[in-house]
């Protein structure tokens, strides 16, 4: 300040008070003070004379502030007005069944042969397909839907779902007749609360106080359909739809007739549904290839090959029309392409984002006193089952906790006992039961317990939309054969994993929680994507890719359906159908699995028996 007294004399004096200044500078000060007074006088003069104009000026001086405020308001408001990019593809790991947006756009400009649809008059023409030279492309009935992606002012562009309004016998009526849904379970209590089932009280403090329900493992039919009602981009205009949802309760339907009914009873609703669907104009758009439906049961319940009553299940998945649709099931077939695995429901169905975050936080902070644990029953009837061995090992280990199921001990099916054990363990063993998959795998992830799988079809080839491609990030694979033949020690195997690695995996598991839970269908999460969101995005990606393939004349002539599990694991464009380390898992069992009299049907039957045992 002292260096600039001349510039700010008045201030300078004030600041330098008591520092002894020369007389001269004081005179200077007086002169400038009087000058100031004169200026002030003149100023007042103009105020009196100019009145309003000066006041106007001064309000204008204030204006920049308010203008700034306005414009900054505009700035903050802006992002909301800017259309969101289509949420087609967010998670790199879930790209397995579709290209990235960049890839798709690139391929849009490739010269290709365009075949117009069969009923149009035009002949196939060869020319570059770009987004703006697309008059001929109008011939494809899905072009309007495809173009909504380019509409920057439409936040739903490319994401619209059209839901068929089915006659109630395909869905609602089944809920009314809930007593008939299962021979052994009164499903009526499980269809309450939009399919979540009765609320769980938190007496033991294992859950949180809200958002927990005694959800039946086969309830996804209803939960998914109700979740769809909250989807933000539903449309009544099917020509805008990126995909078409068929709210048929396929799992509930077959569950009614699996036991003791002839095949015509088991197939009746499926055949009626197909009859209804194929007559709708929406079917004609892509022969049903943009349609999808959900069956909250394992795929083997829908794969009956013959019409013998002794064979298991319905033949829904073998009907030609059904093969054009995508079927979401809790266990898909590794050797078939049109069924897709989605998570079993857990007990947690949060109604808001914060419930999820609080739960994740809590799981991160837990002290886990067991190295590993197992909840389940042995399978003495299955010579190949490793469950007996795992149970023996667990019993002998000081760091393993066991919840045995077969001894009439009801704890094994008590959600709070299971969740408490999982929350207290670092690793949760998830061997196959009657079929490859278990609901338990998702319960363990929900509890932040690292799942240990013994077969890749128990998760890795199933839930490729929901789980990371790199399975070692969040889980452990101990090949069944190693347990069976080499009698390897689970305890040894797991304790060789470094504490740092265990910590990293645990973090990864907890990160997965939002993606594998189904939110409460009666409310809406704000930013969190749940299992439903992930599945719908994947379906939209799949249909969109299919449409682009049709436009560009791309066909998959070399596709080998039997190797579906390999395609599911590969990135688009780099499908390596050569040898895979997991070939032995899938080759050996293939013989039996493909026919309806084989081990898959056995699995389904046993799974049903096991269901009976559980209730
Ligand atoms: C783009 O989306 C907006 C908002 O949904 C809609 O009003 C408009 O008609 C759309 N434009 C076209 C060309 O479809
Ligand atoms: C199948 O069972 C239903 C009733 O359970 C019966 O009405 C029908 O005639 C049976 N169909 C055949 C082909 O046996
Ligand atoms: C399935 O889709 C194909 C076209 O990809 C079509 O030719 C066929 O008719 C469809 N099947 C049925 C039953 O609609
Ligand atoms: C998979 O994850 C593991 C553990 O984080 C890491 O060591 C490995 O390099 C990853 N593999 C690939 C192919 O990214
Ligand atoms: C497997 O190993 C355990 C010890 O780790 C031993 O007690 C058991 O007898 C072995 N079983 C077989 C079949 O070799
Ligand atoms: C199905 O299995 C039974 C025994 O489990 C056998 O008697 C029958 O021949 C098998 N049928 C076919 C078509 O393989």
Image: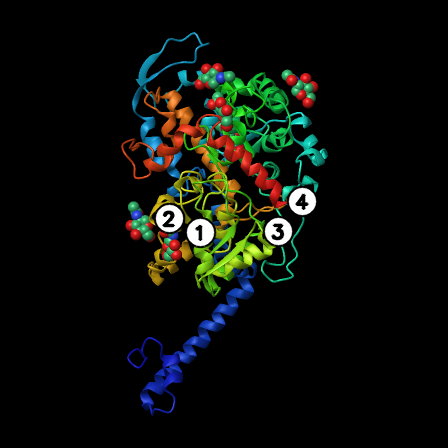
Specify which label sits upstream in the sequence, 4 or 3. Answer: 4
Specify which label sits upstream in the sequence, 3 or 1. Answer: 1
Q: Foreground: 414 or 311?
A: 311
Specify which label sits upstream in the sequence, 4 or 2. Answer: 4
Q: Which mark is residue 408?
A: 3
- Residue 395 visible, this angle: yes
The residue at which mark 1 appears reads as 390
Q: Image check: 160 left or right of 273?
A: left
Distance between the Cα atoms at labels 4 and 3?
29 Å
Distance between the Cα atoms at labels 1 and 2?
8 Å
- Residue 325 visible, this angle: no
Q: Are marks 1 and 4 in contact (CB under 8 Å)?
A: no
Disc 1 versus disc 4: nearer the observer: 1
| Dot 3: element | loop
| Dot 2: element | helix
Which x, y percent locates residue 13? 37, 84
Q: Which mark is residue 483?
A: 2
Q: Are marks 1 and 2 in contact (CB under 8 Å)?
A: yes
The residue at which mark 4 appears reads as 193
């Amino acid at each position: 300040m002292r260096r600039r007294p001349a510039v700010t004399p008045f201030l300078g004096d004030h600041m330098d008070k008591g520092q002894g200044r020369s007389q001269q500078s004081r005179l200077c000060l007086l002169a400038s003070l009087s000058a100031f007074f004169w200026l002030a006088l003149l100023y007042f003069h103009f105020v009196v004379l100019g009145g309003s104009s000066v006041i106007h000026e001064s309000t204008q001086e204030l204006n920049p502030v308010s203008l700034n405020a306005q414009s900054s308001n505009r700035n903050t408001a802006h992002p909301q007005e800017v259309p969101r990019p289509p949420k087609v593809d967010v998670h790199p790991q879930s790209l397995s069944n579709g290209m990235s947006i960049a890839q798709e756009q690139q391929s849009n400009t490739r010269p290709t042969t365009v075949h117009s649809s069969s009923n149009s008059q035009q002949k196939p023409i060869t020319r570059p397909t770009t987004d703006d030279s697309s008059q001929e492309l109008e011939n494809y009935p899905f072009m309007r839907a495809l173009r909504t992606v380019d509409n920057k002012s439409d936040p739903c562009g490319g994401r619209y779902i059209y839901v068929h309004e089915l006659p109630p016998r395909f869905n609602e009526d089944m809920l009314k007749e809930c007593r008939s849904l299962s021979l052994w379970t009164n499903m009526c209590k499980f269809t309450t609360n939009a399919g979540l089932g009765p609320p769980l009280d938190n007496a033991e403090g294992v859950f949180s106080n809200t958002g927990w329900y005694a959800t039946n493992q086969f309830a996804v039919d209803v939960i998914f359909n109700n979740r769809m009602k909250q989807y933000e981009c539903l449309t009544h205009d099917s020509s805008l739809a990126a995909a078409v949802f068929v709210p048929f309760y396929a799992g509930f339907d077959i569950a009614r007739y699996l036991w003791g009914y002839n095949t015509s009873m088991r197939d009746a609703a499926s055949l009626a549904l197909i009859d209804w669907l194929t007559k709708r104009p929406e079917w004609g758009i892509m022969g049903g290839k943009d349609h999808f439906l959900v069956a909250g049961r394992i795929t083997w319940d829908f794969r009956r090959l013959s019409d013998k009553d002794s064979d298991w299940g319905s033949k829904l998945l073998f009907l030609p029309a059904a093969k054009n649709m995508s079927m979401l099931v809790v266990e898909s077939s590794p050797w078939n392409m049109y069924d897709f695995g989605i998570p079993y429901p857990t007990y947690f169905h949060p109604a808001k984002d914060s419930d999820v975050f609080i739960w994740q936080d809590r799981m991160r902070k837990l002290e886990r006193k067991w190295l590993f644990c197992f909840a389940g029953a042995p399978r003495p009837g299955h010579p190949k089952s490793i469950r007996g061995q795992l149970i023996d090992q667990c019993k002998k280990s000081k760091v393993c906790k066991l919840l045995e199921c077969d001894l009439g001990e009801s704890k094994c099916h008590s959600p709070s006992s299971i969740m408490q054990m999982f929350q207290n363990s670092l690793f949760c063993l998830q061997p196959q039961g009657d079929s490859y998959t278990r609901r338990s795998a998702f319960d363990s992830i929900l509890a932040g317990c690292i799942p240990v799988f013994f077969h890749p079809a128990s998760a890795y080839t199933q839930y490729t939309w929901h789980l990371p491609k790199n399975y070692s990030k969040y889980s452990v694979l101990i090949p069944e054969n190693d347990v069976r033949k080499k009698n390897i020690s689970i305890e040894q195997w797991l304790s060789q994993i470094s504490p740092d690695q265990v910590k990293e995996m645990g973090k990864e598991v907890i990160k997965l929680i939002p993606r594998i839970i189904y939110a409460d269908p009666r409310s809406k999460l704000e930013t969190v994507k749940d299992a439903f969101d992930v599945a719908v995005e994947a379906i939209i990606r799949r249909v969109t890719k299919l449409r682009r393939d049709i436009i560009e004349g791309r066909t998959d002539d070399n596709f080998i359906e039997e190797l579906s599990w390999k395609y599911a694991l590969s990135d688009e464009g780099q499908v390596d159908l050569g040898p895979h380390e997991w070939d032995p898992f899938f080759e050996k069992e293939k013989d039996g699995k493909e026919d309806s009299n084989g081990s898959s049907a056995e699995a389904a039957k046993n799974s049903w028996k096991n269901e009976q045992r559980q209730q």
